[in-house]
Amino acid sequence: MSPQVRRFYESFAWKYQGETYNINYRVEGKGPPVLLIHGFGANVNHFRYQFPALVQAGYRVYAVDLLGFGASDKPSNVPYSMELFAELLRDFIVAQKQKEPWIVAGNSIGGLCSLMVAQLLPNAVQGLVLFNCSGGMTGFRYEDVPLWARPILFVVQKVFIQGPFFGPRFFENFRTRENVQTILSKNGVYGVNGVTNVDEELLEILLTPADDEGACDVFLSVFGGPPGPTPESILPTLQCPILALWGQDDPWTPYNAGAHPATGLETFYFQKNAESETNALPKPSYFWQLDVLPGVGHCPHDEVPDIINEKMIAWMGQAKSWYSPKVSS
């Protein structure tokens, strides 16, 4: 690993079901707290461009390696799920004992985690920023698959993804440098406006944790695990404002559809709020904002960081006047 990329930062001892796990997290700056949550296969360093900008803007910035990712512990006997990740993040926020409310931001499954955390801690979260929020963890929802295809999907998940013979081979083929670089730069995960940021540093950030003991088991467990709640089931329960920054060319969770139908429904919520003259949603128009970014893919925060940081900082500066929860002591 090159000397400029640091993996291990601070350690949070998370107690879960009678076990204690070391959770790696990064924290910099002083001011109101901001929590950044990475997506599937990423880690705290995927926010390499957000830390300096947000710290300079006067925020105390945190990022957490979810259990099983980055430099956090990678137990193989844990039932990985969106609910588990949300519990971890809830406990982490509570442990920081911040007196000011949080802005929580996440990419992909980190976006879904953000929604879930705001639901769990309504008095601690002042606002959410979503970077191409996913509609589920990674596994498909059987109810969204035609009846005739469900047995096929079951076999693919249990035999070819999670099976003891094919699963590890799938992981080894998936995690090669050539494959990851192709997925990011040639298969459109990073859009045309962000593909130049698919550099050696990014590949190192994403690939190094894959060499850790337990990484294969975690990858297969999460990849074939339960999708968790849908975004549209959470949105109506939230009180805080939300900014959705969406890469229009994302092949995984595109603006008008997605690998999970819930993602399309979620963007419909924001689109309807932005376009409806009657404001059919039970929120003021500024509460749910959607900004679609042409030429940008699944990871807008890393593809066009200058644009994202500017929009995010400007929005966060206004969020306090829109919604000020009373933080529980």
Image (tube, helix red, strand yellow):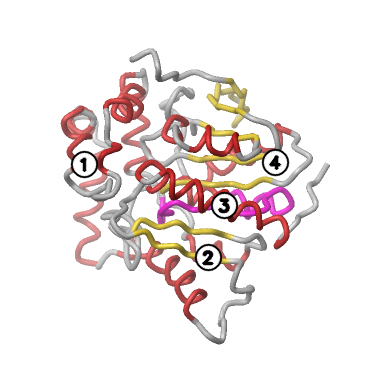
Residue 230 position, x and y percent, is 46, 60
Above or below, 220 against 228 in this view is above
Estimate the spatial distance between the alpha carbons at disc 4 and disc 3, rounded to whole Å: 21 Å
Q: Which residue is mark 2?
A: 289
- Checking the image for residue 312, the label placed there is none
Residue 115 position, x and y percent, is 55, 54
Residue 194 position, x and y percent, is 30, 45
Name which quarter of the figure residue 254 lies in. Answer: bottom left
Which residue sits at x=56%, y=66%? 288
| Label 1: element kind | helix
Query: Which residue range is magenta in the image?
Result: 115-136
Q: Residue furthest bottom?
A: 278
Estimate the spatial distance between the alpha carbons at disc 1 and disc 3, rounded to whole Å: 31 Å
- Checking the image for residue 32, the label placed there is 4
- Checking the image for residue 116, the label placed there is 3
Magenta span includes 121:
yes
**Labels 4 and 3: the sequence-earlier one:** 4
**Labels 4 and 1: the sequence-earlier one:** 4
Which residue sits at x=27%, y=36%? 198
Q: Amino acid at mark 4?
A: Pro
Which residue sits at x=65%, y=34%? 60
Q: Residues within 10 Å of mark 1 (few under 14, many from 20)?
A: some
Q: Residues within 10 Å of mark 2 (few under 14, many from 20)?
A: some
Which residue sits at x=45%, y=36%? 49
**Labels 2 and 1: the sequence-earlier one:** 1
Estimate the spatial distance between the alpha carbons at disc 2 and disc 4, rounded to whole Å: 22 Å
- In the drawing, does residue 32 fall left or right of residue 56? right
Q: Amino acid at mark 2?
A: Gln
Question: In the image, which is nearer the foreground, mark 4 or mark 3?
Answer: 4
